[in-house]
Amino acid sequence: MSDTQTVWRRRVTTPVRAFLRTEAGSAGVLVFAIVVAMVWANVADGSYENFWHTDLSIHLGDGRVELTLREWVNSGLMTLFFLVVGLEARREFDLGDLRDRRRFILPAAAGIVGMILPVSIFLAVNHGGPGATGWGVAMSTDTALALGLLALVGKRVPDQARLFLVTVSVVDDLVALLVIAIFYTDEISMMPLIVAIVLFAATLVLKRLKVRTGYAYLPFGIAIWGAMLASGIDPVVAGLALGLTAAAYTPARGDLEQASDLFRSFREQPTPELARFARVSLVQALSPNDRLQRTFQGWSSYLIVPLFGLANAGIALDAHFLRQAITSPVTVGVFLAYVIGKPVAVTGVSALITAVTRGRIRPGVGWASVLGSGTIAGIGFTVSFLIAALAFDGPLLAEAKLGVLVAAVTAAVLTWAEFRITFLLPKPKRAVALFGDAEQLIDLIPEVDPDRDHTRGPESASVTLVEYGDFQCPYCGRAEPIVREIMTDDDLRFVWRNLPLTDVHPQAQLASEAAEAAALQGKFWEMHDLLLANQDKLRVTDLLGYARKLGLDEERFHEDVMKQTAAYRITEDLESADLSGVSGTPTFFINGQRHYGAYDVHTLKEAIRLARVRAKIAARRR
């Protein structure tokens, strides 16, 4: 079990879940990098700044790019970080909760006000002083660090709370990058900027022409970065823009079947040309968003962001500096902006919109999760340090960085305390506080119909588990004992829908027709169990033997299979799979929502438990 379980976890992990887990895991790496930077800056006299101010230039003919090591990290590598942020935001728009555009209104408003209020607090503290020019330092949440620390301090926080935070953070990242371009750029050269815009438009044309290979876009991305740098605008903006254009979708069955055909051709005639065609077809079946995330996600989380922390977090601390910084308007303004402004803005705007719309637009999570998202949004790092480096130098720069770091620590402690208190509540109140009572989006089309679907378990169960399966699929065979163990739950209903993948499993269609023929004689589940237990024996003679074993009318069974009497039911299941975005097996839905992640016993039981909590909340609301 453990070996296959590991394989399954890798196989079915989706980019959204992988993104959250990767950011959580990389938070420790980033914190370690920050600590190293602080030690380095205070132990090795002057070497920290000297090292990061080392020039590194690239010459190409008459042209050259000359930046310091810190600038290569801040304006070069961080472009890839913002590319990943844009990719995740686009995925939520295409496949996540934000595909219902109304759900974008609230976190977008929270993100915008969550910048305006902190900036106002900072300006109120620094009014008329030299620090007022650095108001942009106090506006942006660090997505990577906030998600990572949220996972560490609130391990049982719903995924929707993290996704809510991602949306808020992406909005303020986008606005913050525009602020950098407009307010923190000394001089803008229009011609390079126009070139960057034209090149960006060219990438949209390539996308419109359905050019899928990443090699076609790579030179455009590099050229856009160079043009933005030449224009005087920080080129990290290009990463976010390109990420937002990368569409996300589940692989279409037609693309997967084409890939299977090419692989079979290669199996029959293993030539380099067919190998290349098969490899390209497999890769291109995935969405551009998925391919880019899998390419850059790990690099961004475990190398680029920690390297950014190492290059920027070093502050030389001494008694004189600390005495000055504690009372400095810059340090105090940044601290209050993040620790007070962010949670008040995020929670207040969410409450206001919910009240004004009378609940028609409300957070997808409970108010404890909203408040926790607000407090953890008080963690600023990447964009804050970028703007601080543009707005300040000398002591003011160090004071701004110190304010950001102290605010981040305080925000993490406040978030831990808030969720700690929440988990002390009685279970019903805790569930509502964490999950909320907003209606959940339904992915399953059509919904389960007891008069049509094959169901196992009580019809009154609060949780329904639907599996799209293929009787010849080895993964479905391995999932069967898992489902059986889960079905010991008395409050769970199981539904099977056929999805025979005939391009890879030639006997799957016949097996499905046999199961439906058995259903005509009231023996669907008995045949279902036999077929999954004997996946290597699905010929006609084997199926007739199973019919005999189950005591079916063999002549009628044989006639129903040969005449495809129940084939229409399989066709309906296939149409349902297409409408629900299902292209592979096994695919599970829990109370109408697609299950992303592993399908081992622990993971499915936890998902079912959360679905039951939501079902009870919905029942109380009705």
Image (spheres, rainbow, N blue to C red):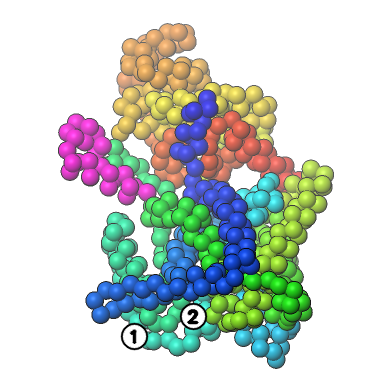
- Residue toward you, 191 or 542: 191
Taking the image as shown, residue 540 lies to the left or right of residue 127, namely left
Q: Is residue 516 magenta?
A: no
Q: Identify the image quadrant of residue 388.
A: bottom right
Secondary structure of residue under mark 2: helix
Residue at coordinates 77% horizontally, 79% vertically from top-left? 327
Residue 191 relative to residue 370: left or right = left
Residue 111 quadrant? bottom right
Q: Is residue 69 above or below residue 127?
A: above
The dot on residue 181 is: 2
User: Would you say residue 152 is visible in this rendering?
Assistant: yes
Q: Position of residue 67 (x, y in %)?
A: 42, 75
Q: Residue furthest bottom?
A: 128
Residue type at mark 1 is Met
Q: Residues within 10 Å of mark 1 (few under 14, many from 20)?
A: few
Vertical side of 337 occupied by 129: above or below: below
Using residue 470 as the reference point, say whether residue 110 is left or right of it. Answer: right
Residue 484, position as x, y percentages in the image: 57, 23
User: Magenta residues?
Assistant: 262-286
Q: Quadrant of residue 75?
A: bottom left
